[in-house]
Image: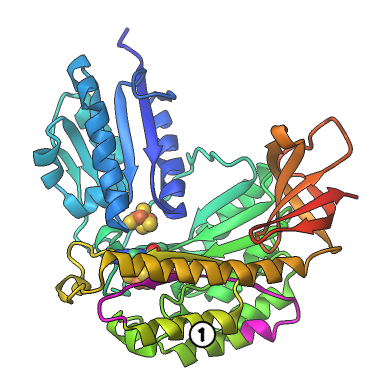
Amino acid sequence: MSPEKTFYLETFGCQMNAHDSEKVIGTLQREGYRRVESEEEAGLILYNTCSIRDKAEQKVFNRLNDYKKLYKSGKRFGVLGCVAQQEGEKIFERAPYVSLVSGSASYRKLPEMLHRLEAGENRITGLDDRQTDETFETEFTARQNPYRGYITIIEGCDKFCAYCVVPYTRGKERSRTSASVLEEARRIADLGYSEIQLLGQNVNSYRDPEGKLSFAELLAAVGQVPGIRRVRFTTSHPRDFTKDIVEVIDAYPTLCDHIHLPVQSGSSRILKAMAREYTSDWYLERISWMKAAKRKISLSTDIIVGFPGETPDDFIQTMDLLAEVQYDCVFGFKYSPRPNTPALVMIDSIPEAEKSQRLQVLLERQREIQRANYSNHLGEVMEVMVEGQNTARGQVTGRSSQNKSVNFTTGSPIAPAPGTYMQVRITATHPNSLVGEAL
Ligand code: SAH
Ligand code: SF4
Ligand code: F3S
């Protein structure tokens, strides 16, 4: 009998990566591998990596370094994901004990790559040249989240924002057919999932290869799958954001009242330098559609501070935009120069301390905005989907349709199962979460 095949997989980065890992795990299990919880137990150690900012990339190389001693005991290492695609064969020079390097656009070839690995081959690569039209679809997805089912609808990115690695790490934009997305939605609803999150670097750039449904129509169709109570989607791009998306949210209550629309900067001059292809007025027009919706839509965004050439005045424009939109959540980042990107040649003249200062000012202001926004929920009764419990505090944790985190008591010693929906009255509010009691 051959020895048992085991693997350890750790995931870094965004939800696209988290969901890719679910598909990779399913593929490995299909190939006869068993997942184990630690590097020490595993025959094959895989890292699904992120390279969005320098810190994320460094984390991966630190991890590889920490565990390289295990190589001597015959273990094999594989690097997957965005750092793999970005660095390619250079990884073998930097970490010679790595045997497999594969970007996400090559995961279809994983079974074949695994067979070569098992045959003792080293330096196996799956690297993409931005040519492929294929998406990675598998029926063997090993869903790790017990209540939220992820479905990729579009892979890659063609936007080439000046600061961003994604178009180089995830290949060109390619959508799945709406028929296959809907088939997967029905399949996971049958498995008992009631929440679906549609994924893509730019979900609203979705183009049905069979030309059947637009993105808004696809949203509406997923929202009508029997058993589905919540549909989310990330991330939208302002350039491709159309009014019919707000209209379908209004029309179908299963589509969650939350939109994440990254703005990056409030200064049109900086947006131009970033190659975002919209102005702050264009962005705010889309926000005004959302604010005119019948249901109050919760808004969130991503912001980069300290992009090359960002003056104090540009930064003030970002702060003004924050005050105007009144987001419920902001992910703020300091600009990080990335390999291969056009912004790399721009002079990154803003000192690190100044970037940190701007980020701090931004996040402090946002905290005050959220404190006010969240306090508006006091006394409200809302539907919360249970995600888990905080035993130390005797609270159940969950999320509202707006994706706000709610911690509540039930008055019962038996915790409700994850995925259960409960009506909760809000009794206290914080800038990042709500507190309540189940009715
Ligand atoms: N496709 C999405 C998000 C991609 S990455 C979009 O276009 O909005 C998530 C976020 O990381 C981005 O929105 C951006 O705010 C941030 N980011 C990307 N590259 C970065 C860089 N080089 N430095 C700092 N932040 C970056
Ligand atoms: Fe990166 Fe821009 Fe593509 Fe988003 S749209 S993934 S920020 S290049
Ligand atoms: Fe990171 Fe790649 Fe996602 S760079 S944020 S894992 S697309």
Residue 303 in the figure: left or right of residue 75 = right
Give the image location of residue 83, x and y in percent.
25, 50
Q: Is residue 285 magenta?
A: no
Q: Disc 1 designates what residue?
A: 320
Q: Which residues are magenta?
A: 289-310
* Residue at the left extreme, as displayed: 93
Compared with 317, 371 (above or below) is: above
Q: Nearer the viewer, residue 388 or 390?
A: 390
Instruction: Please say whether residue 173 is visible from this viewpoint.
Output: no
Q: Which quadrant holds residue 24?
A: top left
Which quadrant is the N terminus positioned in?
Answer: top left
Q: Which quadrant holds residue 279?
A: bottom left
Q: Is residue 309 magenta?
A: yes
At a point 78% along the width and 66% down the height, the residue shown is 377
Count of all numbered marks drawn on residues in the image: 1
Judged from the image, the secondary structure of the residue bearing numbered disc 1 is helix
Compared with 51, 172 (above or below) is: below
Q: Nearer the viewer, residue 431 or 157?
A: 431
Give the image location of residue 338, x and y in percent.
23, 63
- Splitting the image into four quadrants, where does ligand 2 fall? bottom left
Residue 322 in the figure: left or right of residue 355 = right
Q: Nearer the viewer, residue 364 or 142?
A: 364
At a point 37% along the width and 72% down the height, the residue shown is 305
At a point 34% along the width and 21% down the height, the residue shown is 42
Circle 1 crowding by C-alpha within 10 Å: few under 14, some 14–19, many from 20: few
